[in-house]
Amino acid sequence: MGCAALGPSLSPEKVPSLLDRHGCFLRTTHEIFERGVVMDELMYEARTQLRYARKLGLDIRYIDEHMGIGWLFNETEQRNFSEALRVWAMQEGLVWHESIPLKPLFCSSATELQIRLQTLTTGNYLLITHPAYDNEEMRQVGSRDNPLGVVARAREMDLRMLCDPGVRQIIRERNILLSRYDD
């Protein structure tokens, strides 16, 4: 059984520590940690994904960690994945997300985001969301901590929050500039 949606760019035999018995990426960073972190495999896969994205014509300008993967640590090499990614970002001419001082903005609903936007002071803020439609494909995404369907509902809420007319109105009225890491 292959894993087209959540599998590696490399052949499975090149990154076995990252994969389950079906050839899919392990679902959580804890599973990778429990299996044993092989830093070279993590970096090999990351480099391959970047090359592939660029080959497809995507203009990749920055990288960040996903799912808190940066805490993974390799005792033999005495380094964590976050540091390896930071060095790699510099080598590739990419912006590393932690190099920009940003204030976190946590919101889980349109009403909450509206309140936060109304009270923002001058500065640079970071709002991380994962907007998506709650559809059959998204309902197949889950983990030990998030049963199937939970992620889809949460991402639909993100989508609704970001598309909320009240949120958009406040952004216009307060002249809030939306930007990317590399702006």
Image (tube, rainbow, N blue to C red):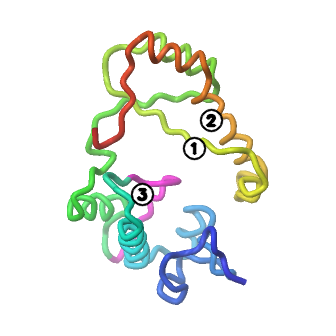
Residue picked out by circle 1: 130
- Considering the whole magenta stretch, tell me its main secondary structure: loop
Query: Which-is-in-front pick, marks 3 and 2?
Result: 2
In the drawing, does residue 102 fall left or right of residue 21? left
Residue picked out by circle 3: 70
Q: Position of residue 26 (x, y in %)?
A: 61, 70
Q: Are marks 1 and 2 in contact (CB under 8 Å)?
A: yes
Answer whether residue 38 is magenta in the image.
no
Residue picked out by circle 2: 158
Q: Earlier in the sequence, mark 1 or mark 2?
A: 1
Q: Position of residue 141 (x, y in %)?
A: 71, 57
Answer whether residue 71 is magenta in the image.
yes
Seen at 37% across and 78% down, the residue is 40
Q: Position of residue 57 (x, y in %)?
A: 37, 63
Q: Judging from the image, what secondary structure is the residue with disc 2 in?
A: helix
Looking at the picture, which amino acid does disc 3 mark? Answer: Gly
Spatial distance from mark 1 to mark 3, Cα to Cα? 19 Å
Seen at 60% across and 61% down, the residue is 28
Spatial distance from mark 3 to mark 2, Cα to Cα? 24 Å
Instruction: Give, as a single range, the part of the protein colored magenta.
Output: 64-76
Q: Is residue 83 above or below residue 100?
A: below
